[in-house]
Amino acid sequence: MTAYPTKLFINGELRSSCEGKTIPQTNPATEEIFCEVAAAGLADISGAVEGAQRAFAHGWRDRIPSQRTDILFNIARLIRENLEPLAQMESQNIGKPLTDARAEVGLGARVFEYYAGAVTKFFGQTIPVARGGFDFTLRQPMGVIAAIVPWNFPFPIACWKVAPALAAGNTVVLKPASQSPLTALRLGQLAQEAGLPPGALQVVPGPGSTIGDALTTHPLVRKVSFTGSTEIGSRLMGLAARDLKRVSLELGGKSPNIVFADADLDEAATSSPLSVFANTGQDCCARSRVFVERPAFDSFVERFLEATRKLQVDDPAKATTEVGPLVSAGQRQLAEQFIEGARKAGRVIALGGRRPFPRGFFLEPTVLLGVETTDRVWQEEVFGPVVCIRPFDDEEQMLREVNDSRYGLSGSLWTNDLKRALRVSRRVEAGVLSVNSHSSVHVEAPFGGFKQSGLGRDLGMAAMEGYTELKNIYVAE
């Protein structure tokens, strides 16, 4: 039986909330409450931020690079040693297939390993200046970072933010989503066990409307790194602007999947279902708008439907499960509203749209045809297992439709014409694009979006730069 961390993690210890409030945790596969987690109050947030500031000022920022490297490698090692209980915890907390949860915990360990190595490879510059003398730049830590992470990929995204922030010499107050706090709390414990000073990583679950706002406006917080909806990100950015506080935002998406007739249709069609239905569509990178060149349209749709029918929708604890439940009844209801809206508009529901089981927040992968580009389901992020497929005849018109979105996070492009791949890739307004692949995330490469999909970048060396201030020093001769 997995032991759940159910208290706040502040200054190196688990403690109850000052207000005594808790957040029930529901297993989406069974609809049963299996534990309750302490909900931070405003006094807890003040204590956590002040403790993080003390940890920053009294040692962590001044640790030599090799010491930070050793601790980050230790965290990675402990994550790997605890991979199975962490994956079990994640799967039960949000309904993620256990196979996927294991892979994501492993990804979190790789993130810490990458930034452990990056600590000693993060350089300033020397600059020849007109007046002579010696001019150079330094990258210095900011201070306390507020990291606010979502419920769809709780553990890996927490690692995406915590690891580079710590590597750069900052301390972190981590606020996990109310639906998925367990692995974040365990990460705090593992970091302490790895040798991180008390207070350098605080973990404070709680309602975003109060706790997220309190973190964003706290005078000791120097930067807010947020992953979540565009609407909440915009509001937090407004709050941070009052003090000209730094922000990085990874927000919503409505990602395109572009398939040209010369592509390997078998590969494109059989891999595309999981590009949108993995994690039950609860993914800001989900390729939920599919554009297929007309000569290949019928063949692609037939193969796409066949591959989708083969997806295993089942108990997330089973090794064969590929699609689990949505995170909550409310999230499923929202997806069903999109499907019903398409039905009422006369769109073709080629597959899915039903609840496959009487218990659990499950919803069948749903394929819509005949959708218009003005339809709500085409324009808005569903965050559920719903995909729309449309044909196109003209590359220019297709690109106009691809870019006719407030979002610009990710996308895929399938073609065997290298010149076309490069030409179209440059034109698609997205921060992350894959050619003949659906891979959006690489630990070593920057991840983030254009337009209302966000500001700044996670992952790669770009993330470390985002957690530092650039200082220039001039020494006269």
Image (cartoon, helix red, strand yellow):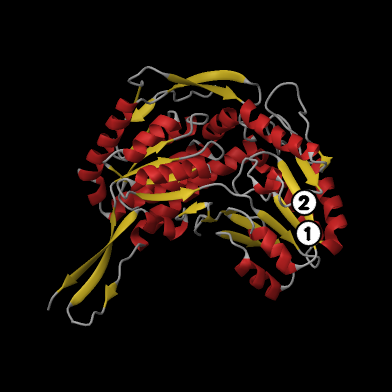
Per the rendering, the mark at residue 292 is 1
Badge count: 2
Of residues 404 and 125, the one nearer the viewer is 404
Q: Does residue 194 appear in this view? A: no
- The image quarter containing residue 78 is top left
- Give the image location of residue 333, x and y in percent: 67, 29
Residue displayed at 48% across by 24% down: 4
Image quadrant containing the N terminus: top right
Rendered location of residue 33, percent (x, y) = 57, 18
Horizontal side of 209 relative to 287 (left or right) equals: left
Q: Is residue 31 left or right of residue 297?
A: left
In the picture provided, is 143 more to the left or to the right than 442? Answer: left
Q: Are marks 2 and 1 in contact (CB under 8 Å)?
A: yes
Looking at the image, which residue is at 34% across and 60% down? 120
Q: Which of marks 2 and 1 is nearer the N terminus?
A: 1
Amino acid marked by disc 1:
Val
Closer to us: 386 or 241? 241
Q: As rendered, which of 341 and 440 lies closer to the eye?
A: 341
Residue 245, compared with residue 55, is above or below; it is below
Q: Residues within 10 Å of mark 1 (few under 14, many from 20)?
A: many
| Amino acid tagged 2 | Ile
Where does the C terminus fall, quadrant-wise? bottom left
Q: Could you tell me if residue 153 is visible in this image?
A: yes
| Mark 2 element type | strand
Q: Which residue is drawn at 60% across and 69% down?
A: 426
- SS for tag 1? strand
189 w.r.t. 35: above or below: below
- Identify which residue is drawn at 73% across, 46% down: 387
Q: Tag 2: Cα neighbours inside 10 Å, few (<14), some, or many (≥20)?
A: many
Q: Real-space Cα distance between discs 2 and 1?
A: 7 Å
Report x, y in % for residue 192: 34, 36
Q: Can you identify the residue that label 2 sits on?
A: 389
